Image (cartoon, rainbow, N blue to C red):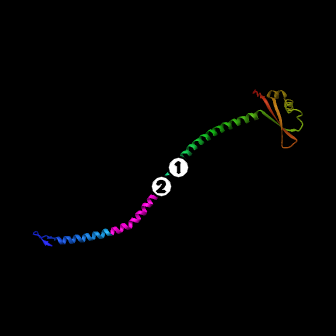
Amino acid sequence: MRITASGRQQATEDEVAQEDERSLGSIMVAIRGLRGSISLIDPKLDAVTVEVILLQAYFGKISEKVKVVETHIEGLLLVTKRLEEQVWSLTKQSTAMAARLEDQEGRASRNNISIVRVSEGMEGQSVELFVEDLVLNTQKPRRLSNFFTVEAAHRMPGEGLMEYRCTVQTIERRWVAK
């Protein structure tokens, strides 16, 4: 070291060179340490790279499957919409048919007269004539003849063999409110 006119110490070239060598040596040691660390990191980096590649392939397959599922869902939504429309239409038809059936059943029961406890063989050759005679020749025949005429009659066996139910379908009804 040398002292300058201002009183400061100034390092000689040899001292500077030695200091530079020491710094360079410590830098080299640090570089070797980093190389060692890098050599340890390299295999791990390679493993991470392989894992990333595998994950990319896996997510690519998942993405393809999601697209397929989305396509199927879109198709199912269309089918569901069509089915809902058909169910709505069928419900509407069913409601109309139920109302129509109820009306028809009501009309059928209004035009029928059931006569029970008729013994077998009482009707003779014609059930129609028997029922007409039975109804018209009982109490107040004039009033009953105004209410209906017999169109058809048939008998159905009841629970026992001895009794039959005669059902008479009337051709017209004339209920006159007086």
State the extent of the magenta-drawn residues as a range.
33-56
Residue beneath the point at 47% across and 53% down: 60
Which amino acid, mark 1? Val
Q: Quadrant of the C terminus?
A: top right
Nearest the viewer among 88 and 119 is 88
Reading the image, the residue beneath label 1 is 68
Up/down of 130 relative to 55, above or below = above
Reading the image, the residue beneath label 2 is 59
- The quarter of the picture where residue 111 lies is top right
Majority secondary structure in the magenta region? helix
Which amino acid, mark 2? Phe
- The quarter of the picture where residue 20 lies is bottom left
Residue beneath the point at 71% across and 36% down: 101
Residue beneath the point at 29% across and 69% down: 28
x and y, in percent, of residue 96 in the image: 66, 36
Total numbered circles: 2
Magenta-drawn stretch contains 48: yes
Up/down of 172 relative to 117, above or below = above
Residue beneath the point at 50% across and 49% down: 67
Q: CA distance from mark 2 to mark 1?
A: 14 Å
- The furthest residue to the left: 5
